[in-house]
Every structure is written in C-alpha cells, then in structure tokens.
Amino acid sequence: MSQTATLFLFVKGTAESPVEQLVADAQCAAALDTLEKIRTLPEIGEIVVATRSAVFAARAYAWGARVENDPIDEEFHWGKCLRDLVRKYHAAIPLYISGGSGILLSADDWRAILQQVIGEPNTVVTNNFFSCDLAAWSPGDALEKIAPPAVDNDLAFRLGEHAGLRVIPLPKNAATQLDIDTPTDLLTTAQHPAVGQHLRAFLNTTRLDTTRIEEVKTVLGNRNATALVAGRVSASLALFLERATRCQWRIFSEERGMRASGRIARGEVRSLLGYYLDSVGAREFFATLARLSDAAVIDTRVLFAHRRLDPPASDRFNSDLLQAEQIADPFIRELTIAAREATIPILLGGHSVVSGGMYALAE
C-alpha cells in the first residue's frame, strides 16, 4: 500500500477523584482493546499514544507505540497537543481516537474507515460531525487551517467548516456512537456482546448498580410502556428507536451542537425542559416526567448549560451515579436527589447517554 495512516490515540488515564478515576480506568481498558484490534492493520503506519498513565504507556510501548507523556503540571489544551503531534510525526493521514470511543468497532470496521480516507483525499471521516470522538482525515495539514479546539468534540466540525474538507459521517449505531465519557456509559456498555476482553475484565471488577439499566431495558421491550429521552437527541436516533424498540416514545431534542457552535461558550444555551425545571423545581419536574413516561433518559449537560453552570467532572459523574451526597453544587445535588427518589427509573448522563448509550441499550 502506497500510503498509511498515523494513529493518534489519546488516553488521559489519571483523575482527581475516585469517580473520575473509575471512568479513566475504563477508558484505559477500552483503549487497550482498540489498540489490539488496530495495531496490525496494514493501513496503519506509526502509532502514537498520548497519555498521563504510566501503566497504559508501558503497555502501549510494548506493542510498538510511540509514547508521548502529557504534562501533568501544565494546563492541557487538546487541540494544540494534537496539532503539535501531527506536525512532529509528519502525519499525512492522521487517525485520531479518544480512549473511550470506537470500542465496539471491529478490526474490519477500522480498516474500512482507513481505506476510505486513504482513497479519498480532502475528506474527513468521523463518527459525529457536531460531537466528534474519532476522525481520520486527509491531508493531515488541514489541521493548520483551523483554530485548534480545546476539546475533541469540535474537530470534525472545524475541519469541515473551516478547512473545507468533505465530511463523510459513519453510520449511526452503537459501534460508532458509543463513547465512554461518564459512569453512565459504563452501565449502558456493560452487557453489549461486542465489548472487548480488557474492558470486560475491568467491568467485572466494578460494583456498579445496574438496577436502573435493567428497569429501563424492561420498558424498552414493553409495548404498553412509554420511554422519554431528552437532550441532544439526533433524528437518526429517534428513527432507530422507533424501529428497534417496542415501547412508545416521548423525545425532547434540544441544543444539538451546543459546544461546536459556540453557544455554550457564549452562554446562549436555552432549554424548554430547563425553563420548566426552573419554574417548578426538581421534585415536581421528575413527578411530571413520571406522569408522562415509565422511564426517562436525560442528557443533564443541556440543563446545566441552560443554567450557565460549568460543574467539575466529580459533580457531573456523581450525579450520573445518583450519589448526591458527594456533590458540591446545590442545584445539581437537589436535581440528583429528586432523580434518585423518582417513581420511575431515571438515567442521567452526558451526550452519550442519548446517543451511543441508547443505541447500545436498544441493540
């Protein structure tokens, strides 16, 4: 093959609180599965791993990867780091993967992605245009034409809108949309048959309560039940849920692309559910959802942004696990208590809970 891609696998691996470390360790395990599947593909040239985890770095190095240690004592800027690494390794065709994404993709899936971008210059292949977790693009120096984004969500959007690359979105399913980004993602992932051996072994060591997941799955399979999903819900997911589940659906789709568009940074996020929550309070909010549905899945990050909150990961993740006592922010703590005491099962999470997580549950 005349051209190969350079893999850039980003895995933070460290955290500031136990609940964050849970997610970080899961991402490391998932990244090992991804690396194991992709490292022998003929379409892959060099493999570059960026991480703060010494354990993960050693494992990747043993498999032939170049290891770049992220600085711990400096403020990390994701986009500048990626740009610098693409420059350093003269990557003509970069493949970027975040540690928790693409974990259900097979080796053949990865090969098809690489063959497409190698065969079609001036393109970017991505799992999500507005909230990218993985992307391959050509030429690599298209990265020089965009302002480096602080987080990976904006990468494909900027390559398409500002660097002029043709965007090729991957099909929407659990394999392309699932990203381990929050504790809820571990719950929705745990029982999927395509989970790799490293992540499976890690999940077997956790003591996560899967009761709510089982209750939500029961609702999805009940023709006489209604499920509610709210947040950054795509039209493709809505169509998939209609076809793949037996229950009835109430769908509230709000603020798609709020980060990539800059609305969250400008304080412009507005949510209909957020306004209702402001009016009636958390307990009545969930009481109303219980009158409308038998289970609810909520992307709380839209509600947080609506209130112009920027909570630390520890508050967000503890809310996802309904561990209200560990939450510092009073609004998020109150919301979490009300969700925990609701009369129907409530799943809280980030974008993935109303994206890859829902695909995984339905599949």
Image (cartoon, helix red, strand yellow):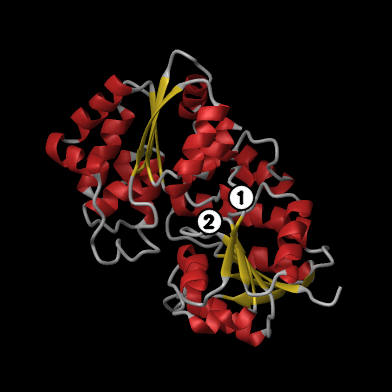
Question: Which residue in the rendered view is the most extreme toward the top?
Answer: 224
Q: Nearer the viewer, residue 18 or 137?
A: 137
> What residue sits right under mark 2 in the picture?
128
Q: Residues within 10 Å of mark 2 (few under 14, many from 20)?
A: many
In the image, residue 271 sits, relative to residue 262, either above or below, namely above
Residue 174 drawn at (x, y percent): 60, 43
Q: Residue at x 82, y 63 (%)?
A: 41
Q: Nearer the viewer, residue 229 or 62?
A: 229
Residue 80 drawn at (x, y percent): 49, 80
In the image, residue 280 sits, relative to residue 248, either above or below, namely below
Q: Residue at x 23, y 39 (%)?
A: 334
In space, the residues marked 1 and 2 are separated at their CA atoms by: 8 Å
Which picture quadrant has residue 170? bottom right
**Does the image show residue 82?**
yes
Q: Amino acid at mark 1?
A: Thr
Which picture quadrant has residue 190? top right
* Image marks 1 and 2: residues in contact by CB distance under 8 Å: yes
7 relative to 309 in the view: left or right: right
Tell me the element at label 2: loop
Tell me the element at label 1: helix
Q: Residues within 10 Å of mark 1 (few under 14, many from 20)?
A: many
Quarter of the image where the N terminus is located: bottom right
129 relative to 341 in the view: left or right: right
In the image, residue 306 sits, relative to residue 83, either above or below, namely above
Residue 232 drawn at (x, y percent): 39, 47
Question: Which residue in the rendered view is the most extreme toward the right?
Answer: 1
Quarter of the image where the C terminus is located: top right
The circle on residue 176 is 1
The circle on residue 221 is none
Q: Amino acid at mark 2?
A: Asn
